Image (spheres, rainbow, N blue to C red):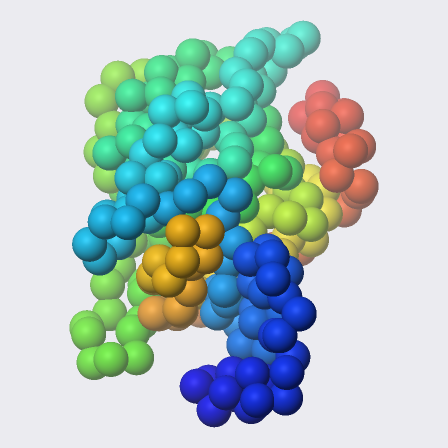
């Protein structure tokens, strides 16, 4: 990887990229040419990343965004026919930043007759948050995936945690909306529910980024992200890396809500 970037720099590929967003796009393309992993990239951030030790700056920027975005709960309402609708974007923020907002939203839709979760504009998030949301959608503790690491760290299983209070549960109809930019942790939520036979996925094939990653600030507006593991689903034995989540009902993202409502009405 270092040699590839050094060769690109020597060839002058990055010389004219004076804007950080342009540089990020060029470098990400070169990095991903190594193995196609979409989590291996130089990422541009519009908001400045605070210059704090380790990943504290990245977490502070994310916490600020979570506060401004109501913990990622963009829309929650009850549609005709007692269908709950929950839109989560732009991220599934860590529970330390979003548990209260997510709990409130999920409790509001708990007694709906059917539920639609909209992930069409969700670009990823924390696996623990995925498990937390899933815990409201199953009746029993459920094994979501096993994470395998390449550094000798023992595999780690992810299960749905116990959540108190009323939940939507594991029996009522559930649809998940996806788009081409649905990515990473949002893909895991759709994939886990689909592979366990819990939800119908409606919309477009997702981006295809399954591997967890770590981020490192290298500039006020640039973050290097590096993959750190590989999830394996207990049903499929694999994941959505490179392939994306394939909808059960494929349709344009803009038409996915109407298509899901028609499917749920059957």
For the C terminus, which image quadrant? top right
Q: Which percent across, then down, holds residue 263?
A: 73, 30
Q: How many marks?
A: 0
Q: Which percent across, then down, holds residue 93?
A: 37, 37
Q: In the rendered image, is residue 241 in sight?
A: no
Residue at the image position 66 percent from the left and 70 percent from the top: 16
Task: From this view, report whether residue 184 is shown above or below residue 71.
Answer: below
Indicate left or right for 122 with 163 as reference: right
Residue 241 or residue 176, whichever sits in front: 241
Residue at the image position 61 percent from the left and 38 percent from the top: 121
Residue at the image position 50 percent from the left and 67 percent from the top: 41
Indicate left or right for 21 with 148 as reference: right
Q: Which percent across, then down, holds residue 107?
A: 37, 16
Q: Which percent across, then down, holds residue 147?
A: 32, 65
Q: Quadrant of residue 62?
A: top left
Q: In the rendered image, is residue 156 in sight?
A: yes
Task: From this view, report whether residue 67 is shown above or below residue 188.
Answer: above
Task: From this view, report whether residue 124 is shown above or below residue 255.
Answer: below
Task: From this view, report whether residue 68 is shown above or below residue 45.
Answer: above
Residue at the image position 42 percent from the left and 38 percent from the top: 92
Residue 68 or residue 248, whichever sits in front: 68
Q: Quadrant of residue 128?
A: top left
């Amino acid at each position: 990887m270092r040699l590839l970037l050094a060769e690109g720099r020597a060839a002058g590929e990055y010389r004219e990229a004076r804007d950080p967003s342009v540089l990020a796009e060029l470098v990400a393309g070169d990095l991903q040419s190594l193995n196609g992993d979409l989590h291996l990239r130089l990422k541009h951030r519009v908001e400045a990343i605070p210059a704090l030790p380790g990943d504290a700056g990245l977490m502070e920027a994310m916490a600020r965004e979570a506060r401004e975005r109501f913990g990622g709960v963009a829309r929650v309402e009850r549609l005709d026919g007692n269908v709950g609708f929950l839109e989560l974007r732009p991220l599934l923020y860590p529970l330390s930043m979003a548990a209260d907002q997510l709990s409130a939203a999920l409790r509001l839709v708990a007694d709906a007759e059917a539920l639609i979760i909209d992930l069409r504009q969700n670009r990823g998030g924390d696996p623990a948050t995925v498990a937390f949301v899933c815990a409201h959608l199953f009746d029993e503790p459920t094994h979501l995936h096993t994470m395998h690491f390449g550094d000798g760290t023992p595999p780690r299983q992810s299960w749905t945690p116990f959540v108190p209070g009323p939940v939507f549960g594991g029996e009522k109809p559930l649809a998940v909306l996806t788009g081409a930019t649905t990515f990473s942790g949002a893909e895991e939520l759709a994939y886990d529910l689909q592979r366990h036979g819990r939800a119908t996925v409606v919309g477009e094939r997702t981006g295809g980024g399954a591997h967890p990653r770590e981020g490192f600030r290298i500039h006020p507006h640039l973050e290097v992200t590096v993959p750190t593991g590989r999830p394996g689903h207990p049903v499929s034995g694999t994941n959505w890396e490179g392939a994306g989540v394939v909808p059960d009902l494929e349709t344009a993202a803009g038409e996915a809500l109407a298509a899901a409502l028609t499917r749920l009405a059957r």
